[in-house]
Amino acid sequence: MAGKTGQSYSVTSFFCGCGGLDLGFCGGFEYRNEQYPKLPFEIKAAYDFNGSCVETYNRYFKCKAEVKDLSQINVSQLKSTEVLIGGFPCQEFSSCGPQGGLDSERGQLYKVLVKYMQTFKPAIVVGENVINLMRMNGGKVIETILKDLRNCGYKVEVWNLYAPDYGVPQTRNRLFFICVRDDIEGFPAHPKEKFSHKPRSIAWAISDLEGITDESVPNQSEYFEASRAKKGNGQGDETNERDKPAYTIRANPKSRVQFHSSLPRRLTVRECARIQTFPDNFVFKHSKTTSISQIGNAVPPILAYQVAATIANFMQKSIQ
């Protein structure tokens, strides 16, 4: 087990997607001329059902993800690591999704985390999902998930994090399930809300891209030319306000991607990635729809970084 020696902690990543949560845990990237130093975590294994996401992931990360259906995987055949992370599928809990909850097959996928916890007893587990999960069935859904996690022998807290409070230029709430094995004393500190009174705007994130129409910045030439809905203000047809955080980048955009705050067009793939706080060298090579879906499904890397940094600090002080 790593401790104050400076060695890294081994990590398994479930439902890794294109890698937003993983990038936050690894650190070692630059975003908007700010450095996010490397953290003491090393991804040893990563898995996702979506082959396109895995292709995007593997272009960036040293550890190569594998395409696996985690609902069918034999957890006992995986490797034991000190940390388990995973943004378990949110579609059945999202207010914009089918809301099948725990009655659906996808809604049961958090149990893959539970099986890993029961089998390998990692020191720390971090799960992530949408805020609507708290509201479903009058709170019974989240109570069930918490009970299952705690029954594995873990102390569990749910952190409801509002992304603009942590420097993300986008209105987005996410839940983080922070689990610490019962035999470990203490608990990671809640990350500090450094931007609660001064949220970053969409202009701060993407105004430097306004004059770029080619691929000198990857993915900046790619955007949908779809017109607005003829009636009403359809989801995705909103125009961003320049001095405020952007609307949430959605995981199911098709052509309904919000409009730029200053230009008469929808946001580009790179602008969506910027709003989600991916560095510019994190490149998306698929179709516009696929790329923006990957971006929208991801955990914003600098939000994940704030979570990972406080966990790293805790582990270095508390685990020998």
Image (cartoon, rainbow, N blue to C red):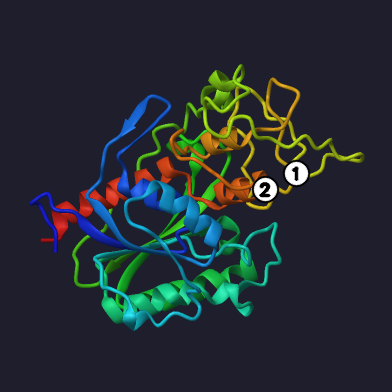
Give the SS element for disc 2: helix
Q: Work out whether residue 269 can be spotted.
A: yes
Give the SS element for disc 1: loop
Which residue, as the protein is rendered here, is positioned at the far top? 211
Q: Is residue 153 left or right of residue 159?
A: left
Q: Amino acid at mark 1?
A: Ser
| Residue for badge 1 | 255
Q: Is residue 214 left or right of residue 77?
A: right
Q: Give the residue drawn at x 50%, y 36%.
A: 164
* Quarter of the rendering containing residue 272: top right
Nearest to the observer: residue 51 or residue 264 = 51
Which of the image's four quarters has the C terminus?
bottom left
Which residue, as the protein is rendered here, is positioned at the far right? 231
Is mark 2 in CB contact (under 8 Å) with mark 1? yes
Which residue, as the protein is rendered here, is positioned at the far left? 5
How far across and down, in percent of the image, does residue 309 sit?
29, 46
Q: Amino acid at mark 2?
A: Thr
Nearest to the observer: residue 190 or residue 124 = 124
Above or below residue 145? Residue 220 is above
| Residue for badge 2 | 289
Nearest to the observer: residue 3 or residue 153 = 3
